[in-house]
Image (tube, grey):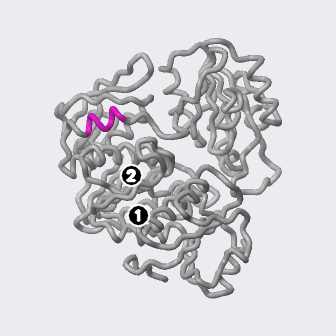
Amino acid sequence: MYHINFSNPIKVHFIGIGGISMSGLAELLHTIGFTVTGSDAKKSKITEHLESLGITVFYGQRASNVTPDIKLAVYTTAVKETNPEYQAVIRTGIPIMDRAELLGQVMLNYSDAIAIAGTHGKTTTTSMLSLILLEAGLDPTISVGGILDNIKGNIRIGHSEHFITEACEYTNSFLKFNPTKSIILNIEAEHLDFFKDIDDIRRSFLLFVERLPQNGLLVINGDIDNVSYFTKDLLCPFMTYSMNASAKPVSGTAAHYTAANIEYDALGHGHYDLMENGKLLTHIELNVLGIHNISNSLPAIALARSLNISLEMIKKALFSFTGTERRFQYKGEVGGVTIIDDYAHHPTEVVATLTAAKNYPHKTTWCVFQPHTYSRTKAFLKEFASALSLADKIVLADIYAARETNPGDISSRDLQKELIKIGKDAYYLESFDDIENFLLQNCNNGDLLITMGAGDVVTIGEALLGM
């Protein structure tokens, strides 16, 4: 395994530099003196930002992009062995590592390396914790899997021992990380194109927990099934949090942090009494929607408390957080119809978003859903139908293939059939143009329109708004 000497900058080439995490790592290396180049399939806001920093980006991936002066190549899991740049790197003997290995090596440079893991909520919780550390003046380095307005992007280069990042379980990427503190938000069946089943996923999260040093810290959701599986042999301290104020997740011991007396304002923003070891600590007000975001705030608070950050700073930072790009993001209004965009692409996320939407002022909820990957759609077909049924009317776009090829045995029409079976108004339209025209004809003043999915469904709302 190649090990980077961060005190001796070299030239590094990123295959797939436009990805949200890859671009952040590229910017980080560039900032600390490395020469960085990269390639991507097409131009984007992210690649344009990298170019504005002086990073060379090639559009189109070809062997000629790999030059002899490159000392290390970095690639994403989306890059296949047939990729011409990947093949050129292997052929010329240039050291190569994947994105997760690079991130793991970066973490070794920080004495306080915090990794946020879980099936859902990573970006939001990472953002919340980041704002708390910024408010406290701790000057963290931040790598977040979305665009956070407060740092004007997805990466912030700090000058302290604090590093905060998301830790994704897909392809066991997080098992290459080197955290000193970790948060686990939830563990559910997901990425079943890689994992065998939920037990396989739980084993991976256990291995992730075991990477913590003896002087580290684990903050874990006590509502996870049999949470003692992850804590019973843990060598470092741990804290639990729960949405159930009376929960006793580990050996009959109450959760360290819970939320009580939860209420919502007129726009659906949550506020609650924060309980620490069963006693009222303070009142928390959030500026984001939904009970899921109340849950996301608890581990951020717990970890911040472990760093001795004051309650006043924690409360101020949480109230200043208005969300990240593509997480119930307000896009605009047209003809009296409010348009929201959301990244939800798993049934649990869909439920969370549509439940939060019920507290948002509106008449009829329209959900334009673009399923993400054939394998996920097939594995959770009935669960997706149940989750989407929380909307009044559902419009389905074709499945976004992402890294997969069409197997021919699953489509959005199958999801439409499941929705119709349970009595929902569900429509399937073949193109985005058809969907836009349908919405223009059927949405009314006062309606709420949510474009939902991890693909390019966001462009439907933007087109309606003339963006």
Residue 15 on the magenta segment: no
Quick one: label 2, few (<14), some, or many (20+) residues within 10 Å? many
Asked if residue 175 shows in the view, the reply is: no
Where are the magenta residues, as a range?
Answer: 314-320
- Numbered mark located on residue 208 in the image: 1
Q: Are marks 2 and 1 in contact (CB under 8 Å)?
A: yes
Local SS, label 2? strand
Residue 455's x, y, as percent?
A: 66, 45
Q: Which numbered disc flags the more N-terminal residue, 2 or 1?
A: 2
Q: Which residue is mark 2?
A: 184
Percent of width and height locating residue 371: 68, 42
Q: Where does the C terminus fall, quadrant-wise?
A: top right
Three-letter amino acid code at disc 1?
Phe
- Image quadrant where residue 463 sits: top right
Q: Residue at x 37, y 37 (%)?
A: 295
Which secondary structure type mostly characterizes the magenta part of the structure?
A: helix
Q: How many other residues sit within 10 Å of disc 1, few (<14), some (14-19) or many (≥20)? A: many
Q: Position of residue 187 (x, y in %)?
A: 46, 50
Q: Is residue 7 above or below residue 254?
A: below
